[in-house]
Image (cartoon, rainbow, N blue to C red):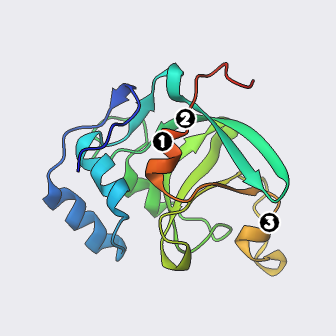
Amino acid sequence: MPTSWPPMERRGCELAIANVLRFEQEIKVRLPDDYRRFLLEVNGGRTANTHCRFTMRRGEQIGKATLNTLHSLDDQSDDGFDLREQQLFRRYDYPENGLRIGYASGWALVLILSGPHRGELWILAIQDPPIEADQRIEWFDRPDAWKVADSFAEFMAGLRPSDAGA
């Protein structure tokens, strides 16, 4: 089933399904189908300015942010946005079942989840200093965690121009 992804200013290298399967084996998680399709059809990159703003919700609060980049699998550039490499820099202060797939404005992490919240996209602001282990609360109750969408495809379909609602 082909998916219509937003226009991209930059894309990652072309991938074969074997690349994705190898990555899933390494991280011990089967990626959501829509995100797998995105990796195979686009493989990360930067969306055009016509498709970079999104809305975040936490209870009654609504926020707006800008998508910076989506990590590419097996990216050979020196920009530091390789999906595999990003998983090596896990921090204890974000969900264990969160796969770091990109960055949003303010260097907030874009996470796609496995487990009971499988496929959901969340934004997690980078805390400086990080939340201490003894101060941990459930990640979805933290003031720096925002739910963005129930699926990757929903998130991508909801991207708007950079000046929309600014």
Residue 78 location in percent, x, y? 37, 35
Instruction: Identify residue type, mark 3.
Output: Arg
For marks 3 and 2, give the CA distance: 24 Å
Please tell me whether mark 3 or mark 1 is closer to you in this view. 1
Q: Residue extending furthest front?
A: 1
Circle 1 is placed at which residue position? 156
The reply to whether callout 3 and callout 2 are in contact (CB within 8 Å) is: no
Q: On the rendered structure, is 17 left or right of 29? A: left
**Crowd band around label 3 with a 10 angstrom C-alpha radius: few (<14), some (14–19), many (20+):** few
Q: On the rendered structure, is 34 left or right of 121? A: left
Which is more toward the observer, 149 or 18? 149
Residue 52 location in percent, x, y? 55, 30
Instruction: Identify residue type, mark 2.
Output: Leu
Q: On the rendered structure, is 91 left or right of 27? A: right
**Crowd band around label 1 with a 10 angstrom C-alpha radius: few (<14), some (14–19), many (20+):** some
For marks 3 and 1, give the CA distance: 24 Å
The residue drawn where x is 79% and y is 70% is 141
Element on which disc 2 rests: loop
Instruction: Identify residue type, mark 1.
Output: Met
Please tell me whether mark 3 or mark 2 is closer to you in this view. 2
For marks 2 and 1, give the CA distance: 6 Å
The residue drawn where x is 36% and y is 26% is 10
Between disc 3 and disc 2, whose residue precedes? 3
The residue drawn where x is 75% and y is 61% is 130
The reply to whether callout 2 and callout 1 are in contact (CB within 8 Å) is: yes
Circle 2 is placed at which residue position? 159
Which is more toward the observer, 108 or 76? 108
Residue 142 numbered tag: 3
Residue 109 location in percent, x, y? 60, 50
The residue drawn where x is 68% and y is 36% is 65
